Amino acid sequence: MPEVQTDHSETAELSKPQLRMVDLNLLTVFDAVMQEQNITRAAHVLGMSQPAVSNAVARLKVMFNDELFVRYGRGIQPTARAFQLFGSVRQALQLVQNELPGSGFEPASSERVFHLCVCSPLDSILTSQ
């Protein structure tokens, strides 16, 4: 009888928190709270109530097994773990945003302001046209 190969990586994966069990919407709350460093302002930016954002932050604390934010004056201060997570969460959200329809750069409808700096010889060429 042939020897059966077992893949123990599947067992290891089952012991990790399952991604399907994670509310990925919490990541947008995390991002807003990190940027605003204030629950009320984050709620306003997200179009949510302050209690809903507070509840989401409580769920994030459980999800990441860290306080993430501590009270500081009238706002909150991110913990070291929150700062560690921020870049990855931001990047993940941006990757998803970039894949959504209509999220590409369209120069005709862009309201971005671009500032150009050019050398003196190019200045006369570019401004004469």
Image (cartoon, rainbow, N blue to C red):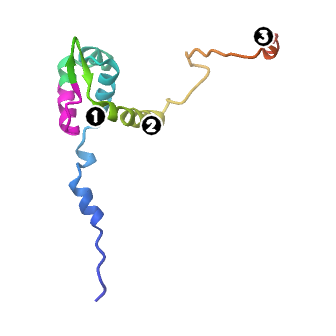
The residues bearing labels 3 and 1 have C-alpha atoms spaced at a distance of 50 Å
Residue 62 falls inside the magenta stretch: yes
Q: Secondary structure at mark 3?
A: helix
The residue pinned by badge 2 equals 95
Q: Nearer the viewer, residue 125 or 46?
A: 125
In primary-sequence order, the first of circles 3 and 2 is 2
Quarter location, residue 39:
top left
Main secondary-structure element of the magenta-colored stretch: helix
The local crowd at label 3, few if under 14, some if 14 to 19, many if 20 or more residues have their Cα within 10 Å, is few
Q: Position of residue 53 (x, y in %)?
A: 22, 23
Q: Which residue is mark 3?
A: 127
Residue picked out by circle 1: 81
- Magenta range: 55-69
Q: Amino acid at mark 1?
A: Arg
Residue farthest toward the bottom in the current orientation of the protein: 1
Q: Is residue 40 left or right of residue 128?
A: left
- Compared to residue 88, the image places residue 106 above or below, namely above
- Give residue 15's position: percent from left, percent from top: 21, 55
Can you tell which quarter of the image residue 128 is in? top right
Residue at the extreme front of the image, as rendered: 80
- Circle 2 or circle 1, nearest the eye: 1
- Residue 6 is situated, as x and y percent measured from the top left of the image, at 28, 72
Residue at x 29%, y 83% (from the top left corner): 3
The mark nearer the N terminus, 2 or 1, is 1
> Which numbered dot is residue 129?
none
Q: CA distance from mark 3 to mark 2?
A: 38 Å
